Image: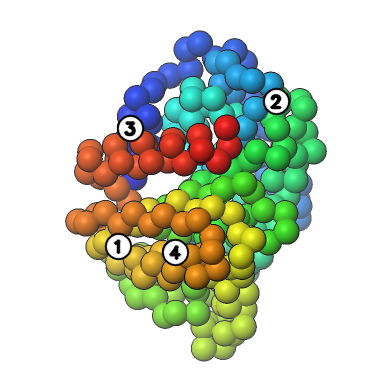
């Protein structure tokens, strides 16, 4: 899914009419000498306090930026949501191994709740959306005690204990070894701990899941198994698999579906 495409499917552009200007690069956490920041986008009008969405970028836990979702955040803000695009620690050769990234996004969620009045947010109405590695993190945020209200997961890996292959010059086993610190055969318990699939219970948040049928980076079975686990526990879950799409969405009709279904989902669960 392209950033411009995501904005286009929401039928929106620019920041004209926003009641409050965006706040970019707001510090939410400092850990290990690294300053983690969030960009905040406000709706042009809203019932105060209003709903919010935390957006988490992808990049194999080693790259990507909170700027990747700025266009999508702008579109969602124009539809009445306060949007927070968050940075989190990226893996390096011997630093920032899991669960550093999860600790960061959970800290960001706490920061939003603690500062909800300043940003006119209803702390009980916060959703999350994430793509790829950010999808994995968003799925975690929809599980457990301090979960968000609802989650949109874009082709996030959910079970890291299943061997991944190498596709289109993207070496998933190498990325996972960098994330975990060891190969799967050396640390299966650590890989399981980084797999949100195994944390699904009956009190999970509602999910909307998108995946490309031809995704060779994160196989669609990762999303199918998450959807099945949620439904087996009586949790609302909708899985949309796009034929002919790989790791991301390019076809206009699929981008349109993504925009319409995502907006309807957030409106239903946050407004």
Mark 4, secondary structure of its residue: helix
Q: Which residue is mark 3?
A: 9
Tell us which disc is closer to us: 3 or 4: 4
Q: Is residue 251 above or below residue 101?
A: above
What residue lies at 48% left-to-right and 25% top-to-bottom? 79
Q: Is residue 100 above or below residue 121?
A: below
Does the CB distance between marks 3 and 4 fall below 8 Å? Answer: no
Specify which label sits upstream in the sequence, 3 or 1. 3
Q: Residue at x 55, y 16 (%)?
A: 44
Q: Is residue 43 above or below residue 218?
A: above
* Residue holding disc 4: 227
From this viewpoint, is residue 134 visible?
no
Q: Label 1, on which residue?
A: 215
Residue at (23% x, 38% y) in the render: 252
Tell me if I can see residue 165 in this picture: yes
Dot 1 alpha-carbon crowd within 10 angstroms: few under 14, some 14 to 19, many 20 or more = some
Left or right, 36 with respect to 73, comes to right
| Residue 212, horizontal then vertical, whole percent | 30, 57
**Label whose residue precedes the other's in the sequence (2 or 4):** 2
């Amino acid at each position: 899914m392209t950033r411009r495409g995501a904005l286009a499917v929401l039928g929106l552009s620019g920041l004209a009419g926003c009641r409050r200007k965006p706040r970019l690069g707001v510090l939410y956490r400092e850990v290990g000498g690294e300053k983690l920041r969030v960009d905040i986008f406000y709706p042009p009008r809203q019932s105060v306090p209003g709903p919010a969405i935390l957006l988490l970028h992808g990049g194999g836990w080693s790259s990507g930026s909170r700027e990747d979702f700025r266009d999508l955040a702008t579109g969602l803000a124009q539809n009445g949501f306060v949007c927070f695009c968050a940075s989190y620690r990226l893996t390096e050769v011997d630093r920032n191994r899991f669960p550093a990234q999860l600790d960061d996004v959970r800290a960001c969620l706490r920061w939003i709740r603690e500062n909800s009045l300043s940003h006119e947010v209803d702390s009980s109405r916060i959703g999350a959306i994430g793509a790829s590695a950010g999808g994995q993190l968003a799925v975690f945020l929809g599980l457990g005690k301090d979960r968000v209200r609802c989650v949109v997961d874009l082709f996030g890996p959910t079970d890291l204990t299943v061997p991944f292959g190498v596709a289109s010059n993207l070496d998933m086993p190498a990325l996972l070894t960098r994330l975990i610190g060891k190969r799967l055969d050396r640390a299966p318990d650590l890989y399981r701990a980084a797999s949100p699939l195994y944390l699904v219970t009956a009190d999970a948040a509602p999910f909307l899941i998108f995946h490309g049928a031809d995704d060779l980076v994160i196989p669609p079975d990762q999303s199918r198994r998450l959807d099945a686990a949620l439904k087996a526990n009586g949790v609302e879950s909708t899985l949309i698999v796009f034929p002919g799409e790989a790791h991301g969405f390019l076809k206009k009709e699929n981008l349109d579906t993504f925009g319409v279904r995502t907006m309807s989902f957030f409106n239903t669960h946050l407004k």
